[in-house]
Amino acid sequence: MSELKVLDEVAPKSFEDLIKEVHDKGICGECGGCVSFCSAAELKAIEMSEKGPPHYSNKDNCLHCGLCYLVCPQTYVLNEELNERFNYKISIGNQKKITSSQATLEEIRNKATDGGVVTALLIYLLERNLIQGALVCKKEGPFNRVPFFATTKEELIESAGSHFDQSQQVSGLEHYDTFIPTITKLKKIVGKDMMNIAVVGTPCQIHSIRKMQELSILPAYVVKYTLGLFCNFNFSFGEKERAKMQEKYGFSFEDVENMNIKESLTLDLKNHESIIIDFEDLTEIARQACFACKDFSNIYADISFGGLGSREKYTTTVIRTNIGEKIYNDALKQGYIQESMELNTAVKKSEMLAKIMSFGKRKFDRYNERMKV
Ligand SMILES: Cc1cc2nc3c(=O)[nH]c(=O)nc-3n(C[C@H](O)[C@H](O)[C@H](O)COP(=O)(O)OP(=O)(O)OC[C@H]3O[C@@H](n4cnc5c(N)ncnc54)[C@H](O)[C@@H]3O)c2cc1C
Ligand code: SF4
Ligand code: SF4
Ligand code: SF4
């Protein structure tokens, strides 16, 4: 289907349709795509809410152009085109190569969630002048990370991982949310001519960026590299849920130092113990929108990353596009990352692939179940 035809068919839809078809159904992932790419951004027609889906801040300023509807990952427009472009295969997407690798620099591995490959690749891109910066997120306090545009190696290392600040007390925080609407920052960082950036994001965020690239919407052209994280769920929870979890698992959130979402949720405590919580026990605090999301392994990213299938301090890396393949191979050749011989045998690779496909299928089934309601 041609771009023009798509636009022609769906142009009359506007933010009001997003409210009806996405927000009211409880499936808005709060990715921020609609706010980032709103044609009336200067006029502040819509904005992110403190909690819940974005809202009209000034309805009269809405141009009814429909862009917000088109880029939303929860509408179905453009999916066929993207699947064709990215050679989609069921439950895994396209994969040119799958590896288990890690950053060569110990400083990165110490801060990273898994093997630090995401951070090492971003540093490679920056040091080779392939990007001027990367849209990531950094910690601002316990369970509080914020969108961040990193432009130096030091800033990229500071943004690695999903660690929490040990020095602050968590009890003052009303609500914890593991989802960070990083792409809402996209428009704010654009403006310099010919800027090239990399974006790290969850599947819903990368999906929104790919839609906007498909439509050649500003600031799509600046995003040259998309590094996607695997994502099963994100969590949103308040005081009541926190108290329940603390009681059930016998720990205090004040002692949580690090969080890792892999085959389950792992909370590493300051005393070096870990609390492992099954996803099944977390459905109460999972964001409702995540039940209506079917992409686990970030099928439209240039490279996707997760801990699933790899051992401690290694990142499972799925290379999907020619661009992804080029930067991964260059970074490997130039010593930014390393692969373990032991973890990269044909058997290990097929085990990794099988795990990802099984998680992908489970997420797809969950989506079908949710959409039946
Ligand atoms: C919310 C969330 C859910 C995940 N779920 C799974 C899962 O179910 N299974 C699985 O195998 N892997 C999951 N991952 C991916 C995994 O936790 C690691 O991020 C991935 O393996 C890369 O590890 P690394 O050490 O190479 O990355 P690092 O080198 O540590 O770099 C991570 C990068 O991600 C950025 N980042 C951190 N948190 C977020 C966020 N919330 N939104 C956007 N960017 C962020 C950081 O700023 C940093 O640039 C999830 C990640 C997140 C953030
Ligand atoms: S101006 Fe366009 S993109 Fe912005 S809210 Fe209105 S319809 Fe959506
Ligand atoms: S899912 Fe993202 S793009 Fe869609 S309405 Fe929600 S915030 Fe906007
Ligand atoms: S599961 Fe992950 S990718 Fe899907 S909506 Fe939730 S945060 Fe986004």
Image (cartoon, rainbow, N blue to C red):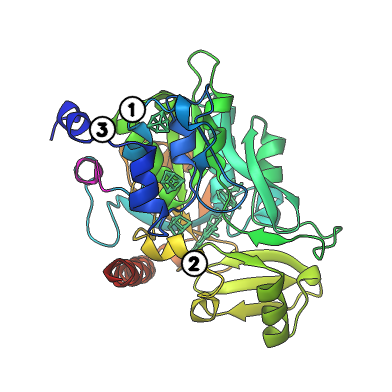
Is residue 156 covered in magenta?
A: no
* Mark carried by residue 65: 1
Q: Earlier in the sequence, mark 2 or mark 1?
A: 1
Q: Name the residue under label 2.
A: 310
Q: Distance between the residues labelled 2 and 1?
A: 45 Å
Cβ of mark 1 under 8 Å from ligand 2: the answer is yes
- Vertical placement of residue 35 versus 237, above or below: above
Q: Mark 3 points at which residue?
A: 12
Q: Quadrant of the N terminus?
A: top left
Magenta segment range?
Answer: 76-83
Nearest the eye: 298 or 48: 48
Q: How many neighbours does mark 2 have within 10 angstroms: few (below 14), some (14-19), or many (20 or more)?
A: many
- Secondary structure under badge 2? loop
- Secondary structure under badge 3? loop
> Looking at the image, do the residues carrying marks 3 and 1 touch, with CB atoms under 8 Å apart?
no
Mark 1: which amino acid?
A: Cys
Cβ of mark 2 under 8 Å from ligand 1: the answer is yes
